[in-house]
Amino acid sequence: MERVEAIVIGAGVVGLACARALAEAGRDVLVLESEGAIGQGTSSRSSEVIHAGLYYPTGSLKARLCVEGRRLMESYCRKRSIPHARPGKLIVATRDTDEAKLAGLLAQGEANSVEGLSLIDGTTARRLEPAVHATAALWSQATGIVDSHALMLSLQGDLERAGGIVALHARVRRITARAHDFVVTTEDGTEVAATYLVNAAGLAAIDLAARTEGLCPTLVPRAHFAKGHYFSLAHHGGRAPFSHLIYPVPEPGGLGIHLTLDLAGRARFGPDVDWIDASRCPAQGAFDYAVDPGRADAFYAQIRRYWPGLPAGALVPAYAGIRPKIVGPSEAAADFLIQDAGSHGLHGLVNLFGIESPGLTSALAIGQEVAARLAD
């Protein structure tokens, strides 16, 4: 049986960040990825936004790791010349009743030590973005965007320079917890033992934990999944008359259908929230990422609240992503769940559950958090 010091399961942005942090701390690290390339799940199907950290309850992991992660992300991208930008974001109230929600978001952001927040009136918002409809807005100067694929390739490069390895097409069948280590068995029957194990399998993390022999089943949360669709613009090279990100006030289950920009200035809209029936959720199989063109009607209605000039027929299907959640549609949003020996008693094991937005922004901070917990 082969043996390494640490195994990380999942080569998305969070798994790679954890593996990098462990390798740079001197650990011998092996990353097991079920797909044929890194970042094929949630990491490659997001808005690629670097969030400022204003939405999350003060003291939560999401608040702390997002604020810390944004600073780490910007510094890392500058040092590695990873394409990124800071266009800033307007969270817009499109009716008077939304303005109190903006004040609440400002207070939450300030409590989370988010930089560069200010409330502006509708006139000031239209000076920044003449095409926007807003009675007021919350300006978040620190919100940015990043090339997530370049980021993941850089993290993989750091890992490999530190002696780590990424093994592709290495789907995990089961995990066995022994007295002082863990044995990971892949689908082809290969067994590898490790002192430290990080379950960063994203959409498959809960299913994988349920197949961990020795982990108490009652500590494994129920898996929920929400599909988010994105649309882009068919005309003018995909460009909209905006230079900043435009968000509505948050809605239950997500941040609303917002307008984000890629690094080439092209606009995309989404995601919406489409809860997937649990009976249709695969264990480690393929999700349906198709975008139903019929969903465009709802997109037009929501986008025109803040961009009344959106032309008819302008939206075309772009892509979809799946969010791994640990609560269902009728429940309050959950925090990240970083489960270590303090909760399950298996020293050396960290399970990462419900790592959805702001997981991309928080990735480097999550990596540091996991490495520190395993060091302890």
Image (cartoon, grey):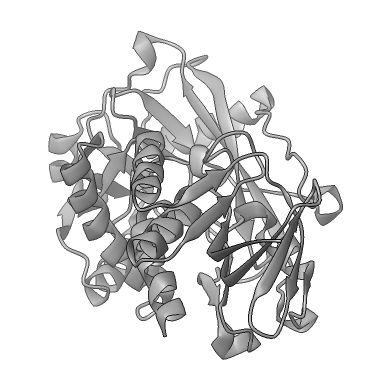
Q: Residue furthest right?
A: 279
The answer, for residue 362, to whether it is visible in the render is: no
Total count of labels: 0
Measured from the top left, where is residue 75 in percent x and y? Answer: 18, 52
Residue nearest the observer in this picture, 74 or 104: 74
Left or right: where 1 falls relative to 100: right
In this rendering, is residue 335 above or below 246?
A: below
Measured from the top left, where is residue 251 in percent x and y? Answer: 50, 56
Measured from the top left, where is residue 253 in percent x and y? Answer: 57, 58
At 47% across and 16% down in the image, what residue appears? 314
In this rendering, is residue 318 above or below 237?
A: below
Left or right: where 147 falls relative to 142: right
At 52% across and 27% down in the image, what residue appears? 231
At 64% across and 31% down in the image, what residue appears? 295
At 70% across and 73% down in the image, what residue appears? 221
In this rendering, is residue 352 above or below 314?
A: below
Q: Quadrant of residue 376?
A: bottom left
Q: Residue furthest top?
A: 236
Measured from the top left, where is residue 179 in percent x and y? Answer: 69, 85
Left or right: where 159 falls relative to 330: left
Residue nearest the observer in this picture, 255 or 276: 276
The answer, for residue 238, to whether it is visible in the render is: yes
Quadrant including the N terminus: bottom right
Residue nearest the observer in this picture, 210 or 121: 210
Q: Quadrant of residue 353?
A: bottom right
Residue nearest the observer in this picture, 326 or 139: 326
